[in-house]
Image (cartoon, rainbow, N blue to C red):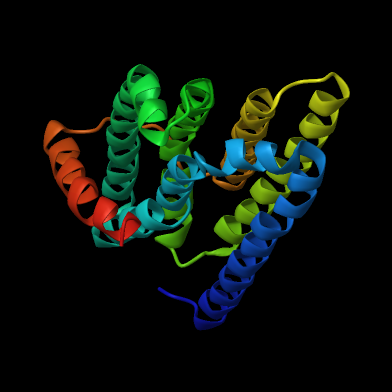
Amino acid sequence: MRSPSKFATGVVLFALAGYLSKFISFAYRVPYQNIAGDFGLYAYQTVYPFAAIVASLGMYAMPVVIAKIGVGAQGPRRKLEVLWGSFYVLLGLAVILVVTMWMLAPVIARLLGDMELAPTLRVISLSYLLMPALAVLRGSFQSVDDLRPSAISQVLENLVRVTVLLIALLIGVRFGQDAYTLSRYAYGATLVGGVIAIVILSLWAKQLRLVPVQPATLRSVLRILLTTGFAVGFA
């Protein structure tokens, strides 16, 4: 049963976390430009949408859809099956996206007008592998109206990402790395932030024991995530 006070507190925390994360994501660009220069910011910003897409899916869209599927599941055993089914489906999709992005990186870079961006696109693609765990863990908490883990992990993920990013930039500039290499360092920091968020959420989640997943569940989850999940993510 939903606890009104718990849910209301979670909503407030989640909203504050969203505003704080947006502020962090906006504020770091000033020191980034000061450290890496205008061309360094260009190398980072040009490919940013490819990172923002997966961040949106793992932070907002997929957790909401997974939570909705989990709420509709009958009983704890069925809920666990849905959550693990969602993880397997998203992991399969993430692997496909990584392989596709890795192979098409030179083509995408050519379309962007700068072939030097291809390695950075490949670094970004690796972050797609973190999305399944982040989405399922956050969705599992949201399905029981507990938004605190999502809110706290979101803020810590961004704080760690920006901290590692700026440190990596300072080290890179100190050793004379070019703008494209610095952009790879920056998106490598995204991987560190994502891993930290997964660790925090995993320590918080104690109910996600492994259970077998039926093929019918996988098909049902795949259909919902491919339709509703991506529709919400790109809305």
Does residue 98 appear anywhere in the picture? no
Residue 4 % position (x, y): 50, 82
Most foreground residue, 108 or 217: 108
As drawn, the residue found furthest toward the front would be: 113
Most foreground residue, 183 or 213: 183
Q: Is residue 45 above or below residue 210?
A: below
Q: Is residue 193 left or right of residue 111?
A: right
Q: Is residue 135 above or below residue 110?
A: below
Q: How many marks?
A: 0
Q: Residue at x 15, y 45 (%)?
A: 223
Q: Is residue 235 left or right of residue 27?
A: left
Q: Residue at x 11, y 37 (%)?
A: 216
Q: Quadrant of the N terminus?
A: bottom left
Report which quarter residue 111 is drawn in: top left
Most foreground residue, 195 or 209: 195
Q: Residue at x 76, y 21 (%)?
A: 177
